[in-house]
Image: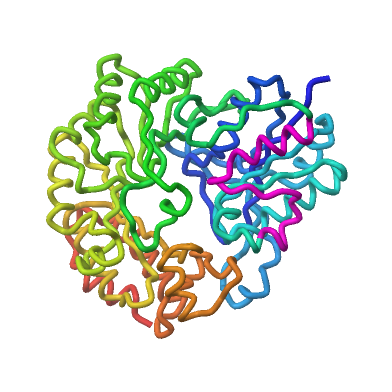
Amino acid sequence: MPKRILLINPYVHDFSLYDFWIKPLTLLYLSKYLKNYGFEIDFLDLLDFKIKYKRYGTGKIYSEIIEKPKFFKDIPRNYKRYGMPLEIFKRKIDEILKPDLILMTSFMSYWYPGVFETIKILKEKFKDTKLVLGGIYVNLCYEHALLNSGADFLVKFYEFEKVFEIIENLTSIKVEKKSFEDIFLKDFPDYSLYKNLNSCAILTSIGCPFKCLYCISPILYKKFIRRSPEKVFEEIKIYKNMGIKDIAFYDDALLFNYKEGFEEFLDRVIKEEIDINFHTPNGIHAREIDENIALKLKRANFKTIRIGFESINDERLKNDFSFKSNKEIFLRAIKNLKKAGFFDIGAYVIIGIYDQGVEEIIDSYAFLYENEIKIYPALFSPVPGTPYYYKWLERKNLRDPIFTNKSIYPDKPDEISFEKYERIKDFAKILNRKIKEKINVYKEAKEFLKD
């Protein structure tokens, strides 16, 4: 009998979650690699359970209201389990053959309660099967996961080869021990694991050359690595043949030095008239958007353009965000995108930083509104392990990862209430609906945000 491995993308417990092309890419890369050694793969993506599809393959994930953690009892929002209904999950694991090993990933550090619940259910069903937990939470909160998760083994990205040691020890099948970087450069995610798929996520690079104080990327990846344009294009053609209509790029620095490979990829897409909609939900750097690349993005059928604007405060951009942009750079990028024919452009505005007043947020909103750019509030979360996180710990001393949940505005100044921040977040929606009306943003804000 061939050895079986169960791959799991776990539940998420949070106040909100929406599927903007969320996919557990590390598990999908592992699946493809392990199949080469004869392993039978079972796969459950518990977040792949949408109740409503929207534009370009995004959608609302099924959720159920659950009890809030005691720390959040005063937060006036429902806390939910996002993902497949429990009874369906339990039925599915009843139907699969007992695995020889379970591999599970994790995402945000404050999503660990959903990870723990998933592990508990799997352990109750497969009592003798070892479970390996990896992913972002493990990388950022290793000690917390070691003490509390219930997993048998933990694996960080920089010790990725450990996965194959565990597999060999438990199954007696020798697997070449490769780093994630090696697998990433040479192979593709195994999207054949999904039965119904009309959209997917992709990476053309891992890591980021910038060193922003709040960012996780330098922790997860020690260097910036880019795949060859030929390999990326080969992957795109596979998805085209699968009938996929929408692809989201989740690179941290998609356009960085684009002439070193990404431009060649775009040229191939344009030349062969690849009929796929492309999206940049992770945000692209304004500094890289010249007339040339803006036109090629348009001709290559990029639809969702999001830019990391962050703040109107150039001093904050310089000190906290590696000076990736400023007002002048941003406006030049917008001019180039509009000239190329993009009009549905959005930009992220960070909200919830402790030394950021309401005025800075509204000034940022006003700047985007006046330039007819949709506003996407990016709720700030101090990510464990980053330089900014340690500054936050000095102020708050809240060491449980759950306190970094962005929905509670963990870094907000005490004088601004949770309710005020919620109204600031909602005000962006008002402005986006009125983007052509040329209203006085400051007058509207004063009325909308008044106590």
**Would you say 18 lies left or right of 314 here?**
right
Which is nearer the eye, 395 or 300?
395
343 left or right of 420? left
Camera-side residue of 155 and 327: 155
Residue shown at 39% from the left, 45% from the top: 223
For the stretch drawn in magenta, the main secondary structure is helix
Query: What residue sits 23% from the left and 26% below the top?
Result: 299
Residue 378 vertical position relative to residue 410 in the rendered view, above or below: above
The structure residue drawn at horizontal position 22% and vertical position 68%, both measured from the top left corner, is 313
Relative horizontal placement of residue 95, taking residue 312 as reference (left or right): right
Residue 91 percent location from the top left of the image = 81, 38
Please tell me whether residue 169 belongs to the stretch shown in magenta.
Answer: yes
Picture colour scheme: rainbow
Query: Residue 3: where, in percent of width, then height?
Result: 78, 26
Quadrant into which the C terminus falls:
bottom left
| Magenta residues (range) | 145-171
Q: Position of residue 149 (x, y in %)?
A: 72, 57
Give the mark count. 0
* View extreme (bottom): residue: 415
Q: Quadrant of residue 194?
A: top right
- Of residues 5 and 430, the one drawn nearer to the viewer in this rendering: 5
Q: Is residue 227 magenta?
A: no
Q: Is 449 located above or below residue 212 in the figure?
A: below
Q: Position of residue 142 (x, y in %)?
A: 62, 58
- The quarter of the picture where residue 148 lies is bottom right
Q: Is residue 193 above or below residue 127?
A: above
Q: Quadrant of the N terminus?
A: top right
x 56%, y 76%: residue: 398
